[in-house]
Amino acid sequence: MKKSGVQSQQKGLGGKGKTRAIERPGLTEDEIEEIREAFNLFDTDNSGTIDPKELKAAMQSLGFESKNPTIYQMIADLENEGPSIDFDTFLRAITEKLGDKETRGGIRKIFELFDDDNSGSVNLNNLRRVAKELGETMTNDELKEMLERAASDGGEITFDDFYNIMTKKAF
């Protein structure tokens, strides 16, 4: 399991910040920094905290409420944390919901983000939705080819297919 540290700027009264390392097992410094950049998008006043209701509204405006129950549940959990969320709380919530992506359980959570219809497999519609959410412009033929290559039966990607793909070191 990887462990890394990233410097975190904590702002107190008067705007003076002290820097401390943020560590999260299983995440690289770059991954923590990407999560920090997402956090900073919602921390518009640079206070070091975000309002869960603002986060919820932003995610709903992006279409995540109905499409992604995992993210919606994470936001609901964050709302229970209190009126404001600091980066440590945000980071913990993200990593608890998505898990260590290198474990079977963590990969299952990622698989479930693809399998939004809970069919137990990833089909063409699931893959098309994920590509669209990620801003990828792929033709149906390209998506079908991905399914054919990834699915052991050539049709839909099962969790075992997905796990094998995600844990391969080289393709």
Image (cartoon, rainbow, N blue to C red):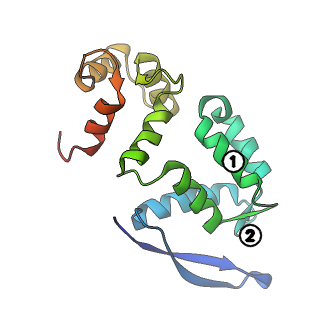
Residue occupied by mark 2: 47
**Which x, y percent locates residue 137?**
42, 26
Among the two numbered marks 1 and 2 on one chain, the one whose residue lies closer to the N terminus? 2
Q: Residue 142 occupies which quadrant of the picture?
A: top left
Who's the residue at 34% across and 26% down the image?
158
Q: Residue furthest left?
A: 170
Helix or strand or loop: what does disc 1 sit on?
helix
In the rendered view of the protein, which quadrant contains the C terminus?
top left
Work out whether residue 88 or residue 158 is closer to the camera in this orientation and state it: 158
In the displayed structure, does residue 163 sit left or right of residue 125?
A: left
- Amino acid type, label 2: Ser
The residue under label 1 is which amino acid type?
Ile
Please provide percent x and percent y for residue 144: 32, 16
- Distance between mark 1 and mark 2 Cα atoms: 19 Å
Q: Position of residue 109 (x, y in %)?
A: 47, 41
Residue 16 visible at all: yes
Write down the residue under mark 1.
75
Q: Secondary structure at mark 2?
A: loop
> In which quadrant of the rendered view does residue 14 lie?
bottom right
Quadrant, the N terminus: bottom left
CA neighbours of label 2 inside 10 A, class few (<14), some (14 to 19), many (20+): some
